[in-house]
Amino acid sequence: MNLDAEVLAQLKSMEPRGGAALDLDGRRRAVLERANRSFADWALAGPDVHEIRDHQVPVEGGTILVRTYHPFADASSLPAHVYAHGGGWTVGTIEDDFVDAEARFRAVEANCVVATVEYRLAPEHPFPIPVQDVVAAVRWVRSAAAELGVDPDVVTLGGASAGANIVCGAVVAAPDLAVRALLLEVPPVDLTWETAQAGVDAGGYEPSVEPMVRAGMNQFLALRAAYLPDPASYRDPAASPLHAADLSVFPETHILTAEADLLRTEGELFGERLTAAGVSTTVTRYAGATHFASMLTKVWPTAKKWHDDLLAALVSVHTRAGN
């Protein structure tokens, strides 16, 4: 596999450039600044929405910020879509320009109210706190349905990378959430890392990208240590949903994987197991994509297709819910 020039340019821009001495808050700020520079270079800006509101939502131990995007005025009974950003459980924020753009696109194109969740981060707030935060956010959206102009019976969940893991954990931890669908982008679903390691060892990746994929393993193990300080949690189904005994509790699920991504194997295996459990599931692998390549919507056709496929899935869920 020869990665396209746009993908290679993004990878090069992400190479470490110092910052090892930064404290955790400094590293988070640096990551956000770099992400927003990347967004300006490579990603499509989101459309205008009628209104954006910030809400402080009660959670155990305090409150979290939930930001809602409203596509037009005087809306009522719209679907709601709750979104969890990525960032390896330790960084990431709804202040990221890409997260903002994704929320805008989903609100306008899928005609729904989007709620982005500023879940608390590890290592200060390890598992299961981020999962509990997303559960609380979904429950709050339902309780505030009249204020938000949403239909409490039509709620979907979406997440990217660590966010995809967390929203899966929310379904496992609180199956009574009864969300209509999950949209999972490059999801880590086996935090034992056994599935990812097996995929690499089996030669499932092109030789040209295998070194990059193997290098990703060390990065993910460090992130896992922050999120799951207790190894006994590795197989907890709310952390590793691939190990859930009963996957039939999952709603309709759409999984998007990247060909040159360490997490591809487990994401696709999760899709197979969901299907075997009777869950309506789609799995789409994007050729030549890396873990972060879906950002490249301005410059890379595959990223634009990824974006369009995701929106189409969400529109389909909402259309069927309205029938």
Image: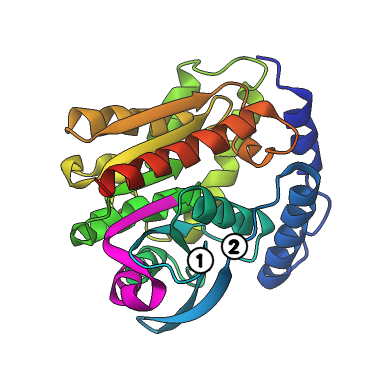
Residue 221 or residue 287, whichever sits in front: 287
Name the residue at the right extreme: 17
Does the magenta run of residues contain 133?
Answer: no
On the picture, is 168 further left or further right than 302?
left
The segment highlighted magenta reads 138-158
Quadrant where the C terminus sits is top left
Residue 278, percent from left and from top: 17, 32
Does the magenta run of residues contain 145?
Answer: yes
Crowding near the residue tagged with mark 2, few <14, some 14–19, many ≥20 C-alpha atoms within 10 Å: some
Is there any visible trace of residue 3 in the rendered image?
Answer: yes
List the residue tagged with mark 1: 70
List the residue tagged with mark 2: 49
Q: Amino acid at mark 1?
A: His
Crowding near the residue tagged with mark 1, few <14, some 14–19, many ≥20 C-alpha atoms within 10 Å: many
Element under disc 1: strand
On the picture, is 168 further left or further right than 307?
left
| Lower sequence index among marks 2 and 1 | 2
Name the residue at the bottom extreme: 62
Q: Quick check: 26 above or below 210?
A: below
Q: Quick check: 109 above or below 62?
A: above
Residue visible at 56% across and 38% down in the picture: 307
Residue 202, percent from left and from top: 45, 17
Q: Amino acid at mark 2?
A: Val
Residue 244 or residue 49, whichever sits in front: 49
Residue visible at 65% across and 29% down in the picture: 212
In the rendered image, which quarter is residue 146 located in?
bottom left
Residue visible at 59% across and 15% down in the picture: 206
